[in-house]
Amino acid sequence: GQQLNQSPQSMFIQEGEDVSMNCTSSSIFNTWLWYKQEPGEGPVLLIALYKAGELTSNGRLTAQFGITRKDSFLNISASIPSDVGIYFCAGVTGANSKLTFGKGITLSVRP
Amino acid sequence: DAGVTQSPTHLIKTRGQHVTLRCSPISGHKSVSWYQQVLGQGPQFIFQYYEKEERGRGNFPDRFSARQFPNYSSELNVNALLLGDSALYLCASSLAEISTDTQYFGPGTRLTVL
């Protein structure tokens, strides 16, 4: 079945640093999404991408939809302690809204 | 406005029992999807319902079933529980069933099977 690959499983950065996360797939997706999940909560949508090549920003977050439709990246600039959490990429292929998620990257920010 | 709500928040069951989880979508949202999130993994799609009809099903056994009510709330039922069914069950709602509609997740129901 379809799979989204996210690595590494964990990332440790210093407060103020920038961090980049990639998500790759062997399948094409029509929509790419980035979610953040904190303990005890459901995933919260950070950025949605709908067109190949699209670059979208949301505050300190920037994400791009890869030209091949098989990858996406998320950048977080000037990290702060509240950026701690699990970051998931997700893709949508067909006409319905089924999301395929990656395994997530746990981000830790050292003050 | 209230977001997606799920009940109960936590549940403990034993093997072989059945469980019913409930979800209320955001007001005005007609599509509800269910996901299973095992510890350390991303959510896995179980079902999508739109206008009370099943519109998508993931790779889960027939022990899993769901339905959507006229007020667009939804139930997920799991029969003959196995230890491996222990997970966080997430409900997401969106306005319609199309891929470009933003899905909003609830906080989930934590199911533990002993």
Image (cartoon, coloured by chain):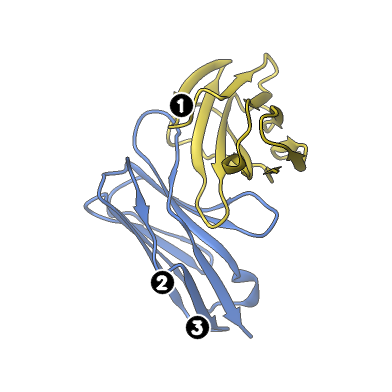
Res. B5 image quadrant: top right
Where residue B110 appears, x then y in whole percent? 70, 45
Q: Are marks 3 and 2 on the same chain?
A: yes
Would you name the residue on which mark 2 appears? A20
Would you name the residue on which mark 1 appears? B57
Q: CA distance from mark 1 to mark 2?
A: 33 Å
Above or below, comparing residue A40 to residue B35 in the picture: below
Q: Are marks 1 and 3 on the same chain?
A: no
Q: In the drawing, does residue A1 fall left or right of residue B19?
A: left
Q: CA distance from mark 3 to mark 2?
A: 10 Å
Residue B1 in view (yes/no)? no
Where residue A17 appears, x then y in whole percent? 50, 83
Q: Please count the marks in the image.
A: 3
Res. B111 image quadrant: top right
Above or below, comparing residue A35 to residue B89 in the picture: below
Tell me the tag on residue A17. Answer: 3
Task: Categorize mark 1 by other alpha carbons within 10 Å: few (<14), some (14-19), many (20+).
Answer: some
Q: Secondary structure at mark 2?
A: strand
Indicate the amino acid at tag 2.
Ser
Q: In the drawing, does residue A57 fall left or right of residue B80?
A: left
Q: Secondary structure at mark 1?
A: strand
Indicate the amino acid at tag 3.
Glu
Q: CA distance from mark 1 to mark 3?
A: 41 Å
Chain letter belonging to callout 2? A
Give the chain ID for the blue colour: A
Indicate the amino acid at tag 1.
Arg
